[in-house]
């Protein structure tokens, strides 16, 4: 009888345009043993994967294309294994971005738009772009109805954001969470095994670690 793996193989994709070490550290805190790699071949044997990103979408897409990762990431998503994409890693899931010229991965229909300049808050103070700081997040649906990645996280929890652009999905049913920053911001998307967060779970304290714990649990389930 074949033994069931208890520690799934999780890869963190290093596009050299991401803070992979914070993600790796968060995964280790919840009991995972991740592999940080720029080798697209590593995805073939992975049970789950994380695509982080910081900076500009073109930089991430250029790295994915140059490293030969774009098609393997699409294929991995199609396999049904857990794929978590963070910040710009979320934005490149979409068809296009106002930030750059390169097309995204096209795993979600929609585009990425600049957060409007010139907005003011309820006290009349100018709202800066980029949006940086802790914001309250509203999850779609009750806890029982959410994607498993967001189970057990209190409604209205605060997460850490750093971004100038916001995702605008064509299919509103794929919006898993929102926040407000002058306009409504898509804070997370989810469709089956593919999940993306605009906020940084690895920089968001205990509630952020809960997302990585849920991700690890999903990875365990995928190999059981």
Image (cartoon, helix red, strand yellow):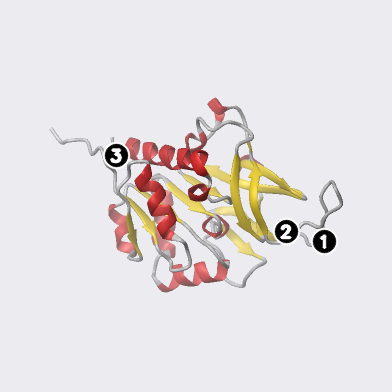
Q: Residue at the location (77% across, 50% down)?
A: 182
Going from N to C along the chain, the mark reached first, 3 or 1, is 1
Q: Is residue 135 left or right of residue 118?
A: left
User: Where is residue 14 shown, x and y percent of the image?
Assistant: 40, 63
- Measure how far apart labels 3 and 1 are at the Cα level: 49 Å
The residue at 51%/68% (across/down) is 61
Query: What separation in Å lies between label 1 and label 2 (alpha carbons)?
Result: 10 Å
Could you say whether the residue bearing mark 3 is in a helix, strand or loop?
A: helix
Residue 31 is situated, as x and y percent measured from the top left of the image, at: 33, 41
Q: Is residue 37 above or below residue 66?
A: above
Callout 1: SS: loop
**Closer to the camera in the image, 155 or 192:** 155
Which residue bears the numbered disc 3? Answer: 223
Percent coordinates x, y for residue 170 in the rendering: 66, 50
Looking at the image, can residue 175 be seen?
Answer: no
Q: CA distance from mark 2 to mark 3?
A: 40 Å
Which quarter of the figure is the N terminus placed in?
A: top left
- The residue carrying mark 2 is 115
Check contact, mark 1 vs mark 2: CB within 8 A: no
**Residue 107 appears in the figure:** yes
Residue annotated with mark 1 = 118
The residue depicted at 35 percent of the width and 66 percent of the height is: 38
Q: Position of residue 126 (x, y in %)?
A: 81, 58
| SS category of the residue bearing label 2 | loop
Q: Nearer the viewer, residue 200 or 93?
A: 200
Give me the residue at 46% from left, 49% from top. Answer: 84
- Residue 87's place in the image compared with 195, above or below, is below
N-terminal-most mark, 2 or 3: 2
């Amino acid at each position: 009888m074949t033994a069931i793996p208890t520690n799934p193989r999780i890869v963190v994709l290093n596009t050299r345009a991401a803070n992979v070490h914070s993600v790796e550290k968060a995964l280790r805190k919840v009991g995972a043993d991740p592999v940080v790699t720029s080798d697209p071949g590593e995805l073939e044997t992975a049970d789950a994967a994380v695509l982080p990103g910081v900076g500009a979408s073109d930089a991430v897409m250029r790295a994915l294309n140059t490293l030969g990762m774009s098609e393997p990431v699409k294929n991995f998503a199609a396999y049904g294994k857990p794929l978590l994409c963070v910040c710009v890693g979320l934005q490149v899931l979409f068809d296009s971005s106002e930030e750059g010229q390169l097309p995204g991965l096209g795993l979600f229909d929609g585009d990425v738009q600049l957060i409007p300049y010139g907005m003011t808050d309820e006290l009349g103070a100018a709202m800066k772009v980029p949006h940086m700081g802790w914001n309250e997040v509203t999850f779609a649906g009750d806890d029982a109805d959410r994607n498993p990645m967001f189970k057990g996280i209190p409604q209205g929890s605060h997460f850490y954001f750093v971004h100038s652009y916001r995702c605008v999905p064509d299919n509103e049913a794929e919006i898993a969470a929102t926040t407000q920053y002058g306009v409504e911001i898509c804070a997370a998307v989810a469709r089956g095994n593919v999940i993306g967060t605009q906020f940084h779970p690895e920089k968001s304290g205990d509630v952020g670690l809960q997302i990585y714990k849920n991700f690890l649990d999903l990875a365990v389930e995928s190999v059981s």
